[in-house]
Image (cartoon, helix red, strand yellow):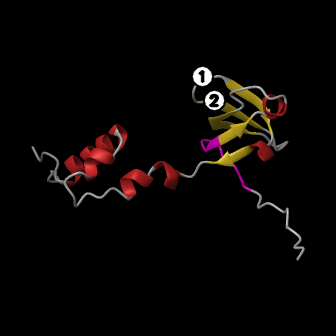
Amino acid sequence: MFTQQNNATVATVFKQGDYVLYRDPARFWTGQPNHTFVCRIETVWATGLHTLTALHTGRAVYGVKSDYMRLLPPLDAMRDIDTAPLNTGTGADDMTAAAMAWLTQQHTTANRLPKLPDQS
């Protein structure tokens, strides 16, 4: 049985400050290594092109088309915190150092009594 696939993709609207996975098409199609990496969007131009900053090098990537980017949702970055089994003794052992630091900060802030400003 033959089924026709729908090749339409959902258009993503990228914003300044978004984190994306970028694939350099020239490097990819020529078989060069390191063609895909994480970037932050610095500028969204009216032409539809983007300026990115590669996180691993800090270098700018100019004239990027949306077709070569995929949004990296915050949900994925925070999943280890959201799903940590904190009710067991080993739950914290499976978390990254960044997740532990964030949880420690939240715990300290949440357990601090609010103080009224000095009235003198």
Residue 20, by quadrant, is: top right
The local secondary structure at tag 2 comes to strand
Is 120 one of the magenta-colored residues? no
Badge 2 amino acid:
Ala
Relative to 3, 87 lies left or right: left
Q: Where does the magenta region start and end? A: 12-20
- Chief secondary structure of the magenta portion: loop
Image position of 41 (left or right of 94): right
Residue drawn at (22%, 54%) of the image? 110
Question: 52 above or below 17?
Answer: above
Q: Residue furthest bottom?
A: 1
Furthest toward the left, the residue is 120
The residue located at (90%, 73%) in the rendering is 2
Residue found at the far front of this picture: 1
Q: Distance of mark 1 from mark 2, alpha carbons?
A: 6 Å
Where is the C terminus found, in terms of image quarters? top left
Using a 10 Å C-alpha cutoff, classify the residue at mark 2 as few (fewer than 14 neighbours), some (14 to 19) or many (20 or more). Answer: some
Q: Residue 12, percent across and down?
A: 72, 55
Q: Residues within 10 Å of mark 1 (few under 14, many from 20)?
A: few
Looking at the image, residue 118 sits to the left or right of residue 58; the answer is left
Mark 1 touches mark 2? (CB < 8 Å): yes
User: In which quadrant of the rendered view does residue 22 lie?
Assistant: top right
Could you tell me how many numbered marks the image carries?
2
Q: Going 87% across and 73% down the picture, which residue do you hit?
A: 3
Secondary-structure class at tag 1: loop
**Above or below, comparing residue 83 to residue 72 in the picture:** below
Residue at screen point 72% across, 54% down: 13
Q: Which residue is mark 1?
A: 57
What amino acid type is highlighted by mark number 1? Answer: Thr
Q: Which residue is mark 2?
A: 54
Between 73 and 6, which is closer to the camera in this rendering? 6
